[in-house]
Image (cartoon, rainbow, N blue to C red):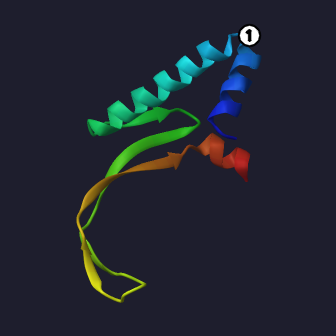
Amino acid sequence: MNKQELIAKIAKDTGATKTMAAQAIDSLIDGITRTLKKGGTVTFVGFGTFKTSQRKARTARNPQTGATIKIAKRRVARFTPGKALKDTVK
């Protein structure tokens, strides 16, 4: 399912217009993004948790040239599914 299919499903299920559903989805994504950018955690009970974690700096190898390159440390977004989601997907 992509974003447009999700918007269409929300609009159909709620009776809202596709424009209103798109605004709701954009607001949700914006809220999650802003919270993660600040270093916070977003939890939907039964669905899962979005949070950030730190990746260590490391060295890697360019597969084309074989040259060694350094990859700097960085923060990445993580998603941990909740118990209800895990049980449903089994």
Task: Give the residue furthest to the bottom.
Answer: 66
- Above or below, 29 against 56 in this view is above
Task: Give the residue furthest to the right.
Answer: 12
Which picture quadrant has residue 24?
top right
- Above or below, 46 against 89 in this view is above
**How many numbered circles does the render carry?**
1
Please provide percent x and percent y for residue 74. Answer: 27, 57
Residue drawn where x is 70% and y is 17% of the image: 11
Which picture quadrant has residue 19?
top right
Q: Is residue 14 left or right of residue 72?
A: right
Amino acid on which disc 1 is placed: Gly
Label 1 environment density (alpha carbons within 10 Å; few <14, some 14–19, many ≥20): few
Q: Mark 1 points at which residue?
A: 15
Please provide percent x and percent y for residue 2. Answer: 65, 39
Q: Nearest the camera: 73 or 53?
A: 73
Quadrant placement of the N terminus: top right
Residue drawn where x is 42% and y is 85% of the image: 64
Residue drawn where x is 58% and y is 21% of the image: 22
Q: Is mark 1 on a helix, strand or loop?
A: loop
Please provide percent x and percent y for residue 9. Answer: 73, 25
Q: In this view, does 38 lie to the left or right of 65?
A: left
Q: In this view, does 47 lie to the left or right of 5?
A: left
Q: Nearest the camera: 4 or 57?
A: 4
Please provide percent x and percent y for residue 88. Answer: 72, 44
Residue drawn where x is 64% and y is 48% of the image: 86
